[in-house]
């Protein structure tokens, strides 16, 4: 197992044919700040230069997948910088979605807002029993700008999507599985993702 990259907010580890990107900014609950997104892009660039990699697992740290966009950073943005931030996040997530790799989100704990958008950019989502999902923007007067409005609808349908967006309600891993938001609820999402990536 080799660790190829460590940048602010993320850690990339490559083990044979499987790359793992860990969101690792626990002081901010792995919020998707500009530095973390830039680090994520650097990780993707490294992975795509490695012809041996066939699968990508994205996971969190300290019991949190991601709390979503960094609200403190959003408060500092004006209209042009907010548009630039949203477009960059869309670009990174679209690159994940378009990649020929097997992409698996291994989710523990909160998976909120932009963090959920990141999970939606993957091919599969494995969740621990303690995983919690929400798009809380309605309570904050904002809406996600990272592509979740489109990906969520195609995955769970218009009715379920509207319910999540308009109520901002948190749903459990079991409920997420029942509506098709996650593929499986497992005790160890990363181990299950490794197993799934190895046999795919």
Image (spheres, grey):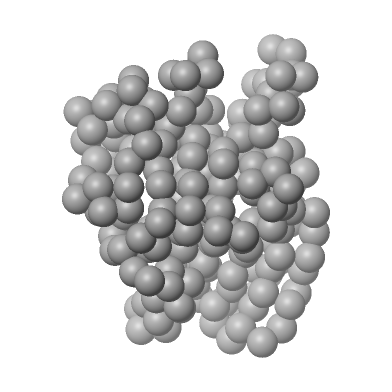
Residue 3 sits in quarter: bottom right
Q: Is residue 21 above or below residue 65?
A: below
Residue 32 sits in quarter: top right
* Numbered-mark total: 0
What percent of the width, then of the height, locates residue 162? Answer: 28, 25
Question: Going by the image, does 190 lie left or right of 157?
Answer: right
Q: Which is nearer the eye, 39 or 64?
A: 64
Question: Going by the image, does 151 lie left or right of 143?
Answer: left
Q: Is residue 161 visible?
A: yes
Q: Is residue 37 visible?
A: no
Q: Specify the quadrant that holds the C terminus.
A: bottom left
Q: Specify the quadrant that holds the N terminus.
A: bottom right
Residue drawn at x 73%, y 48% as measured from the top left: 27
Question: Going by the image, does 159 lie left or right of 58?
Answer: left
Q: Which is nearer the eye, 105 or 164?
A: 164
What percent of the width, then of the height, locates residue 79? Answer: 69, 12
Residue drawn at x 49%, y 40% as measured from the top left: 112
What percent of the width, then of the height, locates residue 168? Answer: 39, 26
Residue 85 sits in quarter: top right
């Amino acid at each position: 197992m080799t660790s190829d990259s460590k940048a602010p907010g993320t850690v990339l580890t490559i083990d044979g044919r499987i790359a793992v990107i860990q969101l690792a900014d626990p002081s901010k609950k792995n919020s998707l700040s500009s530095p973390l997104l830039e680090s994520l892009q650097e990780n993707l660039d490294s992975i795509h230069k490695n012809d041996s990699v066939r699968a990508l697992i994205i996971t969190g740290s300290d019991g949190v997948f991601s709390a979503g966009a960094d609200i403190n950073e959003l408060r500092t943005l004006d209209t042009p910088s907010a548009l630039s931030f949203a477009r960059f996040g869309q670009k990174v997530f679209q690159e994940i979605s378009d990649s020929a790799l097997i992409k698996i989100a291994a989710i523990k704990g909160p998976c909120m807002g932009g963090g959920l958008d990141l999970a939606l950019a993957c091919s599969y989502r494995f969740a621990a029993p303690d995983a919690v999902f929400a798009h809380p923007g309605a309570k904050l007067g904002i809406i996600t700008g990272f592509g979740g409005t489109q990906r969520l609808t195609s995955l769970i349908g218009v009715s379920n999507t509207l319910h999540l967006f308009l109520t901002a309600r948190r749903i459990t891993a079991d409920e997420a599985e029942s509506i098709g938001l996650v593929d499986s609820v497992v005790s160890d999402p990363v181990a299950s993702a490794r197993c799934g990536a190895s046999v795919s």
